[in-house]
Image (cartoon, helix red, strand yellow):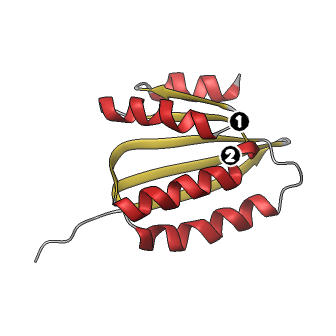
Amino acid sequence: MSHYRHGLSVGIERIGNQFFLNLKAVGKLTHEDYKTITPMLDSALAGVKAPNVRSFFDATEFQGWELRAAWDDFKLGLKHGNEFERIAILGNKGWQEWAAKVGSWFISGEVKYFEDYQAAIAWLQE
C-alpha cells in the first residue's frame, strides 16, 4: 500500500516587532487541508494588531491544488491580503513563478519568486 504525502506546515515567529509566517507545502493541497489550515492562520493573524507580515513559502515540494483547494487559497488571500508586507516564494518549477505573479494581484504587499533560499531570506529581511 502506498501513501500520498501532502499538506502544509505552518511556523509563526516574531523577531522584534516583525511578524514572520513560514509555510512549506508538500504534494497537492486539498480542501480538507484548508479546513485545518485556515482557522490556524485566522487565529494567528487575529492576535496581532495591525499585522505587518512577512512570509516565506517553500514550494519546492508543492505540486499544486485540487480545484476546491485553489478556491480556498484564493479566499484566504482576499481575506488576509492586506496584512502581508512581503511574500517570498521559493520554488523550482516554471508554473510556480507564474502563480506567484498571479498571487501578487491579490496581496497588497510585494510577492517575489526565488529559486535560491539565501536570496529569498535576504530579501525578506531587507
- Residue 86 found in image quarter: top right
- Of all residues shown, which one is farthest toward the bottom? 1
Question: Is the residue marked by circle 1 packed among few (<14), some (14-19), or many (20+) residues within 10 Å?
Answer: some
**Rendered position, 43 above or below 83:** below
Q: Closer to the N terminus: mark 1 or mark 2?
A: 2
Query: What label does residue 42 carry, if any?
Result: none
Frontmost residue, 60 versus 100: 100
Frontmost residue, 117 versus 50: 50
- The quadrant of the image that shows the C terminus is top right
| Residue at image coords 23%, 67% | 4
**Rendered position, 88 above or below 74:** above
Frontmost residue, 7 versus 121: 7
* Separation (CA) of disc 1 from disc 2: 6 Å
- The quadrant of the image that shows the N terminus is bottom left
Query: What label does residue 108 carry, if any?
Result: 1
Q: Position of residue 29 (x, y in %)?
A: 38, 60
- Of all residues shown, which one is farthest toward the right? 49
| Residue at image coords 82%, 63% | 47
| Residue at image coords 87%, 48% | 50
Label 2 amino acid?
Gly
Left or right: 5 in relation to 25: left
Q: Is residue 9 visible?
A: no
Q: Position of residue 20 (x, y in %)?
A: 69, 45
Q: SS of the residue at dot 1?
A: loop
Instruction: Return the residue at label 2.
Output: 81
Whether tag 1 and tag 2 are in contact, CB under 8 A, the answer is yes
